[in-house]
Image (cartoon, rainbow, N blue to C red):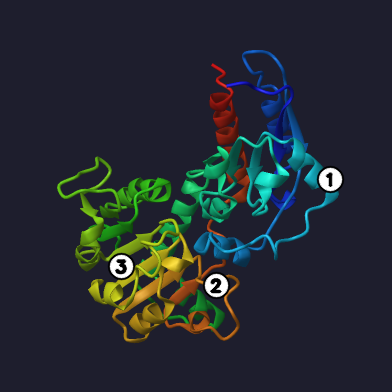
């Protein structure tokens, strides 16, 4: 592989994800210090480009649509950087980036999800695409377990009683001995498993790639995708963290919630498209589920008056399970490692 001199790396993700100036400067310096083995240098350019979350999700859901006609205007400085870049670290890129960036060879998505780039048709232009999967796994795992603890220990009800100045003992339940079922077993669920084990919970998971009889050392049982409902039926807590794919869209529907154990708890920290929200609200209103927590929704921001806002025993957060301060360092470490491998250094 021939490496251009300079090899231009563009930082394209939104500036509000930048860490403190010192940390950002250090991350840039680390990338610029990568020297290709055949000589030359790496140059970092700043080329911010951002699309809103709703459009990002829509691009992932329908990559074959023409997204070039409605995308944000690209600033002249950013377009000039695109024209020179060979690699990019980006949350978003224009759908027509291949024409704007003829030298582009490598893109790392800033987040774990990368389906918004499907409409860029990178494979047709020999551009390698990698994600930052795992960069936020610990923070999101902690958030999910926090929701489970909040539910079992009735923290929300206790807080409300304090607000209303009601002194009445209220006792929660133990997590020990309960079964947590994980939908998916990527980086986030892999981080949830030992945290649940620390509370003496039984941990099982359903994984798309699992085959009957497969096992995993971090799990008490591993279910293949066809046995999702069987896993749901024996789980006291179900936590989902899966990407948006045709197979996962609407996976948690009326039948899936009916398959869950009566009185169980559901938490989704993956993609909002997984959940049929009407079915979830119905399962909560009927008391089939004792509670639920969503950090993601099918439409973000959630429209005013949507039933999820006021659903019974549902705790809602606003796609904020991540920890940006920790994520920044993790993403840039991954990016430096990927660049090192791409440039065949070391």
Task: Please tell me which of labels 2 and 1 falls first in the chain.
Answer: 1
Q: Image quadrant of residue 183?
A: bottom left
In this view, the residue farthest toward the right is 76
Q: Position of residue 217 (x, y in %)?
A: 24, 40
Mark 1 vs mark 3, foreground winner is 1
> How many neighbours does mark 2 have within 10 angstroms: few (below 14), some (14-19), or many (20 or more)?
some
> How many neighbours does mark 1 have within 10 angstroms: few (below 14), some (14-19), or many (20 or more)?
few
In the picture, measured across the screen, residue 59 lies left or right of residue 51, that is: left
CB within 8 Å, label 2 to label 1 = no
In the picture, measured across the screen, residue 15 lies left or right of residue 123, that is: right
- Residue at 56 percent across and 65 percent down: it is 58
Q: Which residue is mark 3?
A: 173
Distance of label 2 from label 1 (alpha carbons): 32 Å
Circle on res. 299? 2
Q: Position of residue 49 (x, y in %)?
A: 72, 52
Task: Please tell me which of labels 2 and 3 falls first in the chain.
Answer: 3
Q: Which residue is mark 1?
A: 77
In the picture, measured across the screen, residue 129 lies left or right of residue 224, that is: right
Mark 2 vs mark 3, foreground winner is 2
Kindly state the secondary structure of the residue where label 1 is placed: helix
């Amino acid at each position: 592989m021939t490496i251009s001199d300079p090899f231009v790396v563009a930082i394209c993700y939104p500036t509000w994800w930048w860490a403190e100036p010192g940390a950002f400067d250090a991350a840039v310096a680390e990338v610029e210090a990568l020297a290709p083995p055949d000589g030359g240098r790496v140059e970092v350019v700043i080329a911010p480009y951002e699309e809103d979350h709703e459009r990002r999700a829509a691009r992932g859901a329908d990559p074959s649509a023409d997204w070039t006609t409605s995308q944000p205007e690209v600033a002249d400085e950013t377009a000039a950087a695109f024209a020179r870049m060979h690699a990019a670290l980006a949350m978003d890129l224009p759908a027509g980036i291949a024409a704007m960036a003829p030298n582009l060879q490598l893109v790392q998505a800033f987040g774990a999800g990368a389906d918004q780039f499907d409409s860029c048709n990178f494979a047709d232009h020999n551009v390698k695409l990698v994600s930052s999967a795992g960069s936020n796994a610990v923070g999101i795992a902690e958030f999910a377990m926090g929701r489970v603890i909040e539910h079992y220990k009735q923290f929300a009800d206790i807080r409300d009683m304090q607000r209303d100045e009601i002194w009445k003992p209220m006792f929660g339940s133990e997590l020990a001995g309960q079964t947590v079922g994980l939908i998916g077993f990527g980086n986030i669920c892999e981080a949830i498993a030992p945290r649940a084990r620390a509370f003496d919970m039984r941990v099982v998971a359903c994984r798309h790639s699992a085959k009957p009889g497969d096992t995993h050392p971090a799990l008490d049982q591993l279910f293949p995708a066809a046995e999702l409902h069987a896993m749901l039926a024996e789980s006291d807590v179900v936590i989902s963290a899966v990407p948006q794919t045709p197979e996962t869209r609407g996976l948690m529907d009326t039948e899936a919630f009916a398959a869950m154990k009566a009185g169980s708890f559901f938490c989704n920290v993956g993609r909002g498209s997984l959940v049929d929200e009407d079915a979830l609200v119905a399962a909560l209103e009927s008391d089939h589920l004792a509670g639920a927590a969503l950090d993601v929704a099918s439409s973000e921001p959630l429209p005013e008056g949507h039933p999820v806002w006021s659903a019974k025993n549902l705790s809602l957060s606003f796609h904020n399970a991540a920890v940006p301060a920790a994520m920044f360092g993790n993403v840039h470490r991954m990016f430096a490692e990927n660049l090192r491998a791409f440039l065949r250094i070391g």
